[in-house]
Amino acid sequence: MKKVYALFTAIGIGVSALAQIPNAGFENWTAVGSHEDPDGWATMNFLSVPNGHTSCQKSTDHVLGGSYSVKISSNTSLNQSQGGYGLIATGGFDFPFQPAFPVLQNPTALTFYYKTEMFNTDSGQVVVVLFNQGTVTSQHGEALPPATSWTPYVLDIDAVGMADSATIILFAYAPEGSNDFPTGNSSIWIDHLNWDELISGVEEGEEEAIGIDLYPNPASEQITVSNLETGDVVTVYDLAGQLIMSLKSFNSSQNLEVGSLSEGMYLIEINRGNSVGRKTFVVR
């Protein structure tokens, strides 16, 4: 695991006051001169675009719902003051880090999907900083493994004390100190940031939520889903949103054979009229 301690030059970008992760699916963009920036995020485009490089772009290469993701790119021919370091952040690039948006309760994880195009020794990185009354309570950052196709990721967060706000920084390289820099013209795509639960490939809509239980979790051969009603439709998806199995329940519980599934995380959805229940489970 790589922790980030990069020192950024303060460039005076204002702090967001959004109640959720700003523009977490990167669907909303605003034109700024000849380029676009994702709403709620500070980018290096104001430095890089005049030097012929777009460090942050709206990409139609996305996963699950929506139309866009964010693509962040480094350019080794440009230095940091020229926008060559590929990174974006909620709020701004101040150091020490500053709160960018409120959190209503301590998150246990930041989940998202990503893919990379890395060169030399580069790797992407995602960093979360939690605050209480403006003081950093915890900081979490991990260098991401290379991923040539969309890959789900869960960044675990061990909060120290109660958090009231957060900031998130996304990198197309993996800095550990103030002298670290990109080693290649590398890019990272990010989509569907979320607290705690990985977003599935199924639209939530306006359904009423229902509670379901499943066990064991993790499972290796069979998983049992309980609290069902006759006629419930039980569906399992992988994290790319691909349908794995679907059946109708005729009992209060249903056994699902999962021994043939690849190891990893899956989503189970229960549809009952206008109500829906969703949980994730792990196959090992």
Image (spheres, grey):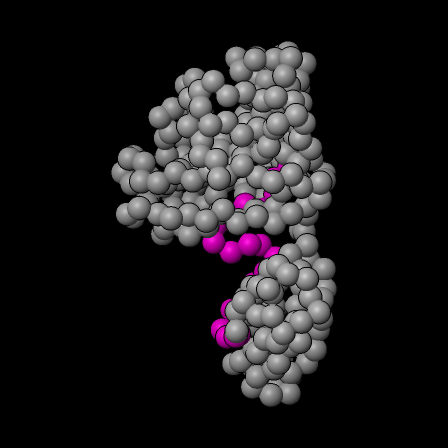
Q: Is residue 201 visible?
A: no
Q: In which quadrant of the rendered image does the C terminus lie? A: bottom right
Q: Is residue 94 magenta?
A: no
Q: Classify 256 as above or below 143.
A: below
Quadrant in the picture for residue 166? top left
Q: Residue at x 60, y 60 (%)?
A: 265
Q: Classify 244 as above or below 230.
A: above
Q: Residue at x 31, y 40 (%)?
A: 137
Q: Give percent across and percent down for residue 197.
A: 51, 56
Q: Nearer the viewer, residue 241 or 142?
A: 142
Q: Give percent across and percent down for residue 2.
A: 48, 35
Left or right of 20 in this view: 230: right
Q: Nearer the viewer, residue 206 or 218?
A: 218
Q: Classify 14 as above or below 18.
A: above
Q: Nearer the viewer, residue 63 or 121?
A: 121
Q: Give percent across and percent down for residue 206.
A: 56, 63
What is the magenta range?
A: 189-215
Q: Give percent across and percent down for residue 25.
A: 59, 44
Q: Residue at x 62, y 59 (%)?
A: 264
Q: Is residue 206 magenta?
A: yes
Q: Classify 284 as above or below 23.
A: below
